[in-house]
């Protein structure tokens, strides 16, 4: 082991005590020697199925200078073991890292056992990656308790990723990321660190933005500790974009080129299944994951297929407005194809809990402090018919115990999702838990008082804390903890729980935890 280049940081707490006992990777055959350590962006895993998982890394010895790799393809050896010391390697192979994919590798490791931990690592020449840990989904027929964290909105300049250091320390089965993994723009009132470069619009620029974020050791530790399920929101491309339209760019074709570059860079940097690989400006990231009989989890894409904003053509969706167009039947958040897929999927597989993982707050949120009504057109309120169709699908197919999780709004929310939000007597269809952000600034507290007063189905709202949420699924109960960082402007800041809610088997709606 002494002649191997070791990772500069230790990423996985669990492996610290065992480092000396780790079996050497072994030199399988001659491989190119790289002058600098290539695994600067860490390792990750995702797409956990009962028998497979995707493992990821990217070779980038000079991550902020275009990656630092030559045009040559490079062989990357990988191993997956049943133990953290790599005494029982159960799968191994060789992937090829190519310049066209920024020397990222995505390996779908098949033939694994369900519902258990695995450890993985990569090697190029004498350089060995940090060790990652991952977990397969339970087998169909099994229904073990599950616990996962969900996170979103991590503007790099506005804070440190202490929330991720805490996520890495928790006992979880997986992590769900609900979007705004990077931010294309600099905004916010107080920055503690700086983006390199300006607003990215080209593939090299988006790659550099991901590299900057992924150099963060706390983010790397959360990736190395658990498999992730990831979907994007708007800031991976451009603020508040809708399908082929961005308020920042008048020309549609030009914007679709930006979208293609952004989607490609997202794929290159996330542990996504090959099914999510972009084709130009298109990529199918919506998907279904089954966790035995315990959970049926749907990942949705709110951005790529949605109707353009209602009530404010071509402008930003920030102000609160209303107009007849908002309620048009043909308005869609998911697009026709994805809506049909959701309906088919809910009609088929069932789990004890149906988790709908999507980008933003789903509950109606009237923002007008007076007698009138005003809504934020970028959220589901701008797509009311699409929301109703989604909730109708849940009811029609008797999706068991639907729980919606979301991010985007940089605040914690717990809400009842109703068949008609304006009718207090209408039935509760699903339970929603939203936010907060890892670092991104929250909205104004003044607005929150209006939200509470005007929207009785919203049971909890808090916007002054950054952090994440932890969802525990048991047979009879789903418990959600809202976890807050003491001060995201300080590195290594502690995390504590600010609220706990629950929902009960067979009874949709928020209850006190
Ligand atoms: Fe955000
Ligand atoms: Ca967003």
Image: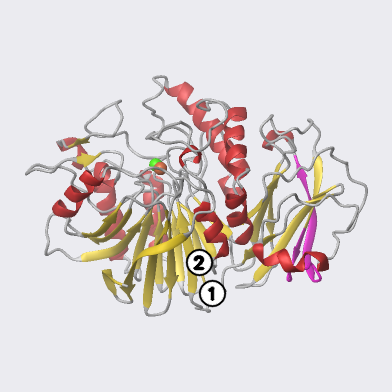
The spot of residue 45 in percent (x, y) is 63, 56
Mark 2 neighbour class, 10 Å CA radius: few under 14, some 14 to 19, many 20 or more: many
CA gap, disc 2 and disc 1: 8 Å
Quadrant of the displayed image that contains ligand 1: top left
Residue situated furthest top in the rendering: 251
Q: Please tell me whether residue 84 is drawn above or below residue 37 in the rendered image.
A: below
**Marked residue nearer the N-terminal end (2 or 1):** 1
Name the quarter where the C terminus is drawn: bottom left
Q: Main secondary structure of the magenta part?
A: strand
Q: Please tell me whether residue 483 is drawn above or below residue 311 in the rendered image.
A: below
- Residue in view at x 50 percent, y 40 percent: 156
| Residue holding disc 1 | 140
Mark 2 secondary-structure assignment:
strand
In-front residue for pair 348/96: 96
In the picture, measured across the screen, residue 453 lies left or right of residue 376, that is left
- Residue in view at x 46 percent, y 54 percent: 151
| Residue holding disc 2 | 290
Q: Is residue 53 visible?
A: yes
Residue situated furthest right in the rendering: 30
Q: Quadrant of residue 13?
A: bottom right
Name the quarter where the N terminus is drawn: bottom right
């Amino acid at each position: 082991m002494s002649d191997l280049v070791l990772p500069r940081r230790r990423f996985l707490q669990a492996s610290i005590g065992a480092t000396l006992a780790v079996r050497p990777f072994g030199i399988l055959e001659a491989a190119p020697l790289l002058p600098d350590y290539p695994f600067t962006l860490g390792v990750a895993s995702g797409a956990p199925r009962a028998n497979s998982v995707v493992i990821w890394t990217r070779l980038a010895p000079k991550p902020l200078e275009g990656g630092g790799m030559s045009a040559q393809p490079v062989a990357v050896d990988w191993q997956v073991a049943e133990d953290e010391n790599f005494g029982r390697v159960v799968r191994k192979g060789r992937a090829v890292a190519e310049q066209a994919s920024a020397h990222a590798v995505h390996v779908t490791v098949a033939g694994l056992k369900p519902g258990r931990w695995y450890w993985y690592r990569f090697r190029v020449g004498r350089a060995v990656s940090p060790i990652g840990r991952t977990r397969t989904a339970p087998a169909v027929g099994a229904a073990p308790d599950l616990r996962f964290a969900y996170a979103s909105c991590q503007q790099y300049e506005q804070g440190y990723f202490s929330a991720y250091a805490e996520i890495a320390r928790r006992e979880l089965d997986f992590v769900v990321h609900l979007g705004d993994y990077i931010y294309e723009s600099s905004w916010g009132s107080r920055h503690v660190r700086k983006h390199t470069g300006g607003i990215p619009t080209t593939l090299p620029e988006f790659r550099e933005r991901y590299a900057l974020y992924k150099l963060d050791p706390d983010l790397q530790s959360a990736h190395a500790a658990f498999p992730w399920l990831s979907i994007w929101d708007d800031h991976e491309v451009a603020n508040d974009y809708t399908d082929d339209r961005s308020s920042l760019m008048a020309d549609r074709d030009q914007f679709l080129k930006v979208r293609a570059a952004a989607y490609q860079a997202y794929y290159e940097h996330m542990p996504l299944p090959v099914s999510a690989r972009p084709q130009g400006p298109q990529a199918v990231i919506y998907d279904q994951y089954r966790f035995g009989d315990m959970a049926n989890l749907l990942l949705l894409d709110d951005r790529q297929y949605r109707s353009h904003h209602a009530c404010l053509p071509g402008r930003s969706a920030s102000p609160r407005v209303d107009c007849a167009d908002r309620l048009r039947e043909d308005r869609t958040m998911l697009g026709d194809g994805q809506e049909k897929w959701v309906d088919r999927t809910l009609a088929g597989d069932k789990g004890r809990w149906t988790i709908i993982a999507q980008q933003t707050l789903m509950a109606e949120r009237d923002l007008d402090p007076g007698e009138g009504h005003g809504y934020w057109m970028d959220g589901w309120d701008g797509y009311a018919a699409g929301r109703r169709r989604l909730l109708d699908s849940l009811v029609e197919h008797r999706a068991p115990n639907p729980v919606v999780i979301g991010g985007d709004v940089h605040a914690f929310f717990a809400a009842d999702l109703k068949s008609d939000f304006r009718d207090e007597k209408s039935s509760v269809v699903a339970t929603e838990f939203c936010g907060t952000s890892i670092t991104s600034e929250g909205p104004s507290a003044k607005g929150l008082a209006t939200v509470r007063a005007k929207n009785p189905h919203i049971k909890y709202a808090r916007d002054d804390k950054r952090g994440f949420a932890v969802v525990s699924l048991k047979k009879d109960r789903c418990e959600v903890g809202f976890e807050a960082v003491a001060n995201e402007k300080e590195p290594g800041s502690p995390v504590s729980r600010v609220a706990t809610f629950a929902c009960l088997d067979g009874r949709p709606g928020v209850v006190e935890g």
